[in-house]
Image (tube, grey):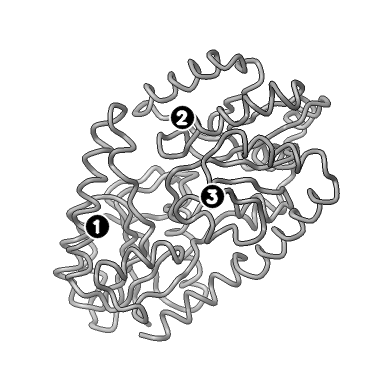
Amino acid sequence: MTRVAIVTSHLQGGDAVSNDVVGMAGALARRGFDARVYSESSELTDTEVFKVSSIHEFLKDPADLVVYHYSIGWEPGLELLRTAKCRTAIKYHNVTPPESFAGVSPWHEERCRTGLEELKEVVRVGCDLYLADSGYNRDDLVAEGVPYDHCLVVPPFHHIDELQFVEADTETLDKYRDGRTNILMVGRVSPHKGHEALMKAFAVYHHDQDPESRLIIVGKEEAAFEIYSRRLRELANFFAINDAVLFTGGVSLSELKAYYLLARVFAIASEHEGFCVPVVEAMSLTVPIVAYASTAIPDTVGDAGIVLDQRDPQLMAEAIDRLVKDEALNFEFGLLGRQRYEEHFTTQKIEAELFRAVEGL
């Protein structure tokens, strides 16, 4: 039985990279591989995670495979690729531009700068296979020298199957099903996620179009980004929308389902995404999308949402207003999103792409 070690620097709940690691391990195990998850540190309680220091005891045959999920600077991961006595693969999630964290988190700024530098070394090592979350990510690898036909797009595994079938939290539904127009954004509260730009657009929409609207921002707030979180509250006060903006913090899957069901529109103004799982969650639940055309977002959304080339708060406000008021258009984009999810991003579709890549080895 072929052994596969799936490796990343850190694992935590609600994190897209962590979900992809665990999902990939499960998919490989279902196909008969002896798959294990390895990490330097982990906050997961429902997944067995092995220490990276023990990985060479597991990988004993040249036909075995190590898959390194790469999204931040981590020297042990690079060293593992250099010393592995078996086949190697990269799953590239992209690296957030370090300047996004300037003045907010020196640790994240340094790790992301290192991550960009290490990407050149990762390519130079010459892995047997390069996987990318999106076409945007693949372009990064190709630009660094990976042959185009040696780099395959495999979207990240996710928890949407569970989200589809979990019961929505009734307390959340009852509390916010109050006649106000709910605009939703999902994603951790981090500087590159564009909350400031989204709040500017929402302020225009709220004051000019719908004073009975509410912006719901779902996402964990971390101590490392406290400066950024405080800045967002100050901005809400400056734009006179602090009573119309809800920061939920981290939520359960049941609560997340409720917020999607409450949403009239899913809006995102992120400045950097290697894929953006929340827009796929929105598509799966027929919530129409408005987004700025940043990084991988056009690649993920396709024609299943309104994607704006200009980062203009007035344009985003107008797009939100149109989707709120035009029932037929709202329904059409919701349906297009669901179709795109079923055609490209279900667990079965992602598994098929993964095994097409693995079998190519």
Decide: few, some or many residues near mark 1? Use Cα within 10 Å; few <14, some 14-19, many ≥20.
Answer: many
Report, in whole angstroms, how far the alpha carbon at label 2 lies from the one at label 1. Answer: 28 Å
Identify which amino acid the numbered label 1 is placed on.
Val
Q: Is residue 355 above or below residue 344?
A: below
Instruction: Give the residue pinned by disc 2.
Output: 221
Instruction: Give the residue pinned by disc 3.
Output: 309
Q: Is residue 314 above or below residue 335?
A: above
| Dot 2 or dot 3, earlier in sequence | 2
Q: Is residue 66 left or right of residue 158?
A: left
Q: Is residue 184 above or below residue 199?
A: below
Q: Which of the 4 image quarters holds residue 128?
A: bottom left
**Camera-side mark, 1 or 3:** 3
Report, in whole angstroms, how far the alpha carbon at label 2 lies from the one at label 3. Answer: 29 Å
Q: Position of residue 83 (x, y in %)?
A: 14, 69
Which numbered circle lies on residue 52?
Answer: 1
Q: Position of residue 232 (x, y in %)?
A: 48, 22
Q: Position of residue 84 (x, y in %)?
A: 18, 72
The kind of secondary structure element at disc 1 is helix
